[in-house]
Amino acid sequence: MFTDSECVNVASMQHGVGSGSGLLGRVAALVGRSPKMIVGLAALFTIAAGLYGLPASQSLPAGGYDVPNSESLRAQQFLQDEFGVGGNPIYFTVTAQNGADSTAALTQAHKVVSALSGSQYIHQITWYGQTPAGVTNPLISKDGRTGLVVARLEGDDTDAPARARHIADPLVGAHDGVSVQGGGQALTYDAGNRQSREDLIVMEVIAFPITFLALVWIFGSAVAALLPLVVSLFAIAGTAAALSALNLATDVSIFGVNVATALGLALAIDYTLFIVSRYREELVSGSTQACALNVTMQTAGRTVLYSAMTMACTVAVMLIFPQYLLKSLAYASLISVILSLVGALVVAPALIVLLGDKLNKFDIRSYVGHLFRRSDAAPQETSDRVWARIARFSTNRPVTVIIVIGAVLALLGFPVLGIKLAYPDDRVLPTSQTARLAGDIVRTDFDQNFTATTRIGIMGESIPLDSVDQYAQRLSEIGGVRAVSAPGTVYIHGQRVGPSTPGSADLRDTGAYVSLSTDVDPFSDQGKNMLETIKGVPGPAQVLVDSLAQKNKDNIAGITDRLPLVLIAIIAVTFVLIFLMTGSIILPIKALVMNLLSLCVAFGALVWIFQDGNLGGLGTVATGHFTAFIPPLLACIAYALAIDYEIFVLSRIREAWLATDGTPAGNKQAVAVGLMRTGRIVTAAATVMIVVFIAISAGQVAFMRGLGVGLAVGVAVDAFLVRPLLVPAFMQLMGRLNWWAPGPLARWHRRWGLVEESEPSPVPVTAGTR
């Protein structure tokens, strides 16, 4: 439709964007020649990916929290290989108003026991009807209305949830006045899987229409507003298909789909917003459609490319963590970034070419303005004046702005110092889920915490029975330990009280194991301290601990042990890419500090709301800790989004700086022009992202709700406080030093840096220059 020469010649003369022979120039030329082919292929890809990926992605597992080869997993493997008692607890509560010993309750309990006995994956079935009459029954609740059926379920967090669901679905619910609920780790994972699918639908129902309305107000045109949504569908469908295909080769968590949907929607809109806005800006300045597209690709397209590169590198650091859940989230984020980039740089421009003048059809904002007799001033001009005033405010009093805003952000982020991490349990689920109901019953109605049973494998050949007994006796003397089952014996507070039940302990030629029952929450500080006390008791041979407390310790260590490497990678990515774009070593340091402030506020909000229970925990249960894998995920995504805006703002400031005389006054002008040109679009993009992240927080899984709130807070702080106030103030304070680098680095950047083929000529620019 457009000739390459027309675009290149005018663009080179007016904007100094180079010959157009680079990558983005060739993309612009391809889009101009074959827009119908590109849109057709994109449509076929979206349909095919959607038909394959969306149904297949719903069968992904909900596990991935465990660290491979951790002590808890090795203990489970030892117990399974040597004694056939591996796996995780699964339990059922049988509740009747007439009591757990009533005929109706016993009938349902027998059905549960029969179903468990019929499964090849179930071992060590213990139920309240086995306890002899006249003996205190720990498997009956304090009020006598609930009885417990407890067993062990084979399988890891990928296989066990489906097995648990198959067993539990026919059993749970109300039967003849008796309530049966199922709990345990496997059922918790399965419930998380189901709830995530429901939450994904809720998120889409909320996010798409509200986002469309926001985009209509941003663009004015309903047609232009649809463009980012079309690109987001391309990215979301493609990511779902890629994750489903990837699951054939490696484990991928269902939560990756939720993150991919949110991130695909947010990034596709973000990137396309930058492209469409710059294209329309060029049209307003008098460029032809061909030239506007070429300039857009060489400027906004270049910024989007750098932004996507930075974001991809940042989220990729999650691959450093050993848990496949975090790896899954890294896969999902990487694929979302790549497809959003392709959509914004290829699909969106092709649609722009095909639409032509129709891009601005159905200008609803103009209609509303006339309806309410509003001023005819162009929204862009009004916005420029507002952002010019904000820029003057920040640059005229930089020290005051830095001190005040910095102090406010530090205060808001202060709660992060008290953050406590833990493994997720059934309390992350809504009370409508059977795993949550069963967990609440066990925690509140029973003296013994059956979810906190600890098993200790003793690895060694021909271990004497006496040494195992002595070890069990010492363990029983630990505060908070109610009883210890040794082979043939039960110890309570150091005293032998009777025989142990079958399956609770054993001794063979290749090793032994004992079991501990406690009344302590394994995720609490008391539970952590008890674990360390248990591990401090000398064993007769090498011991391995299998408990939720140990699993909690292993999984948190899997994150914290890799955290220094992750931080180094993020710092390196930030420094290298921003240096390559700007040629400065000051601006990367500034970006790190500013983004750290935004992150601290986001984490502070999470701790204050979800860990400490303020604001009612936004409908979640405050457990005194926060789900361990959310902070690294939030940090990577929120930091990457902050860098996204950083690059967009810096690119326009640098563009203006290169057109000045290089004096301190020129730096101030460049900052003002850059903020004036980006303020509206950054806040608009942030508003759309906040809508998407709030839609995530509408879900019922507590840690996903926390992720949504944390991302929304992080983006809001970055876009409405850091970018418009702190960044201009800092850059005004630093003056020409913003662009400084040591001589060798400066020379290297001039030769190898990420710059256009021809930079704009240095001419004076004022804050009011369009």
Image: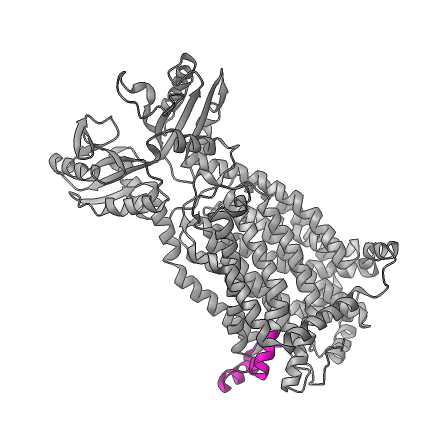
* Location of residue 605 in the rendering, given as x and y in whole percent from the top left corner: 52, 54
Q: Position of residue 538 (x, y in %)?
A: 17, 46
Quadrant holding the N terminus: bottom right
* 501 displayed left or right of 571: left
Asked if residue 187 is positioned above or below residue 718 in the image, the reply reads above
The residue located at (33%, 39%) in the rendering is: 520
Residue 605 sits inside the magenta stretch = no
Quadrant placement of the C terminus: bottom right
- Residue 432 drawn above or below residue 333: above
User: Which one is nearer the viewer's eye here, 22 or 366?
Assistant: 366
Q: How many marks?
A: 0
The magenta region covers 729-756
Which residue is located at x 24 percent, y 26 percent? 502
**Side of 324 where 538 appears, left or right:** left
| Dominant secondary structure, magenta | helix
Q: Position of residue 229 (x, y in %)?
A: 69, 52
In the foreground, 729 or 689: 729
Quadrant assignment, res 348: bottom right
Can residue 192 be seen by looking at this rendering? yes
Image coords of residue 255 (percent x, y) = 52, 45
- Is residue 62 positioned above or below 268 on the image? above
Between 449 and 681, the one nearer to me in the picture = 449
Quadrant of the rendered image containing residue 390: bottom right
